[in-house]
Image (tube, rainbow, N blue to C red):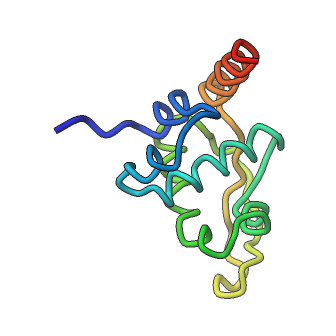
Amino acid sequence: MPRTLTPAERLADADKNTTLDQIIQQSEWSQFLVEQAVFHYGQRKPEFSCNDLRDVLPELGHGYLGAAINALRTGGVIEHTGRMVPSTSGPTHGHRISVWRLSAKGRGIAQQRAARREAAA
């Protein structure tokens, strides 16, 4: 049985030519899509929280957001800034949530992907 790729490995391996069939082959493809969205958002914003991401994800993605954040954190792609903000999600009653940023590893993956896109253009 092949080894499951880490979030960092999936991000490093993914490119703009990833087909829907390849994504569906992932054991949890919905989480994979949310991980991609979080990574993409992190490339454009210096810091972000789940509050920011809930506003840009479709309703279906909300259930995968915590798992995607945790997977990216565990994989070293994002890191905690040391800051917390109150949640804007109603059911959470304003509990504190973490503020994140891309780690050096995450920025490196982003640079590699950008270089591959440039080379393919």
- Residue at 44% x, 43% y is 22
Is residue 73 rendered to the left or right of residue 1? Answer: right
Report the front residue among 13 and 85.
13
Q: Quadrant of residue 84?
A: bottom right
Residue 11, given in percent of the width and then of the height, sits at 55, 35
Q: Is residue 31 above or below residue 42?
A: below
Residue 19, given in percent of the width and then of the height, sits at 53, 42
Q: Residue furthest top?
A: 119
Residue 28, given in percent of the width and then of the height, sits at 40, 57
Q: Quadrant of residue 85?
A: bottom right
- Residue at 72% x, 53% y is 99
Is residue 56 rendered to the left or right of residue 70? Answer: right
Image quarter where the C terminus lies is: top right
Residue 104, given in percent of the width and then of the height, sits at 65, 25
Q: Residue furthest right?
A: 45
Q: Is residue 113 above or below residue 23?
A: above
Q: Residue furthest left?
A: 1
Report the front residue among 105 and 14.
14
Is residue 72 rendered to the left or right of residue 86? Answer: left
User: Total of numbered circles in the picture?
Assistant: 0
Q: Is residue 63 above or below residue 92?
A: above
- Residue at 61% x, 71% y is 62
Report the front residue among 28 and 63.
28
- Residue at 16% x, 39% y is 1
Q: Quadrant of residue 16?
A: top right
